[in-house]
Amino acid sequence: MMNILFWISNIIIVYALLVVAVTALRKPTDIRYTFLNLFRQRRRSGVTLLAITLGGVAVFIFGGFVDYSFWALREQTIRTNLGHIQLYEKGYLTGGANNSLQYTIKNYDEVKRLLLADAQIAPQIATVTGQLAFSGIISQYDTGTSTFFTGVGIEPETSLVLGSLDRIVSGSDLSRVEQQDITVGSGIANALSAGYSDWVDMLVVNPQGGRTPCRLRCAACSSPALKNMTTRPSNCR
């Protein structure tokens, strides 16, 4: 949108300059009278110049606000564990909604190594991290509450960069996450009345379609930059 406005404004400016140049060549007397009139009516000329200046400033400020809004939306989307580019196993986008664990990238380490070794791609890469999406039921028997969830298994160290906009409400960040620790979104934490260091039980759908129970500890509660993501436990390991 801003690019379109930029080109339109440039076209208008060029057109106005062409009109002035043609008029100066064909009717130089009119140009001379115009400048004399500007200096003769100084108050009116000053008010007109001030209005043009304020209008230009307002347009530039609005353009900057729009640019910043799109930039912030892009960065919030990228830095909530989504990234610029996502690679999937073939068939994930068509059949992964039912059981995403059936479409894991089997040679993930090799793919990561090839990306970081590519002479053209590697200089543009800030970080490469793997994620494992899964879903199931999470419960806390102490309060007798449970709810459905979708989770993401991550690599904690690299996800510190990719999820840098996720705000830790309580607990520790991902650099100190242990093997049986998870970070839950604030929506899940409120639904379960769970907090830092509480233990929860998960029933996860495995690749074979069965159910795998596990007991995990809440190492942190996060508040993602995108509010609609707070209803799932994100950043699980």
Image: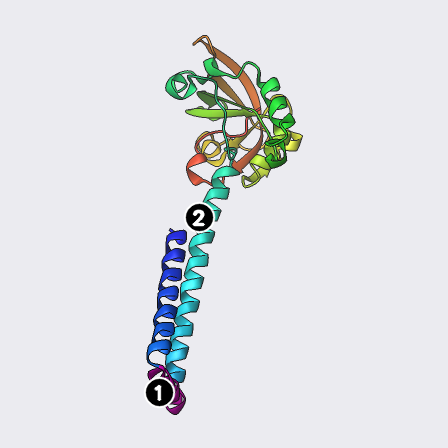
Which residue bears the numbered disc 2? 70
Residue at 56% across, 21% down: 216
The numbered mark, 1 or 2, whose residue comes first in the sequence reads 1
Is 42 colored magenta in this rendering?
yes
Amino acid of disc 2: Phe
Of residues 194 and 232, the one nearer the viewer is 232
Give SS at disc 2: helix
Residue 223 visible? The answer is: no
Instruction: Say if 192 sits above or below 51 in the image.
Output: above
Which residue bears the numbered disc 1? 33
Is 169 colored magenta in this rendering?
no
Of residues 6 and 94, the one nearer the viewer is 6
Prevalent SS, magenta region? helix
Instruction: Say if 108 sits above or below 234 in the image.
Output: above
Quadrant in which the C terminus is drawn: top right
Residue at 42% across, 58% down: 63
Residue 174 visible? The answer is: yes
- Badge 2, how many Cα within 10 Å: few under 14, some, many 20+? few
The answer to whether the residue labelled 1 contacts the one labelled 2, judged by CB atoms less than 8 Å apart, is no
- Where residue 110 appears, as percent x and y from the top left, is 61, 18
Magenta-highlighted residues: 28-44
Amino acid of disc 1: Tyr
Give SS at disc 1: helix
Residue at 45% across, 25% down: 150
Q: CA distance from mark 1 to mark 2?
A: 47 Å
- Where residue 159 appears, as percent x and y from the top left, is 59, 32
Of residues 101 and 42, the one nearer the viewer is 42
Of residues 83 and 202, the one nearer the viewer is 83
Instruction: Say if 27 sits above or below 159 in the image.
Output: below
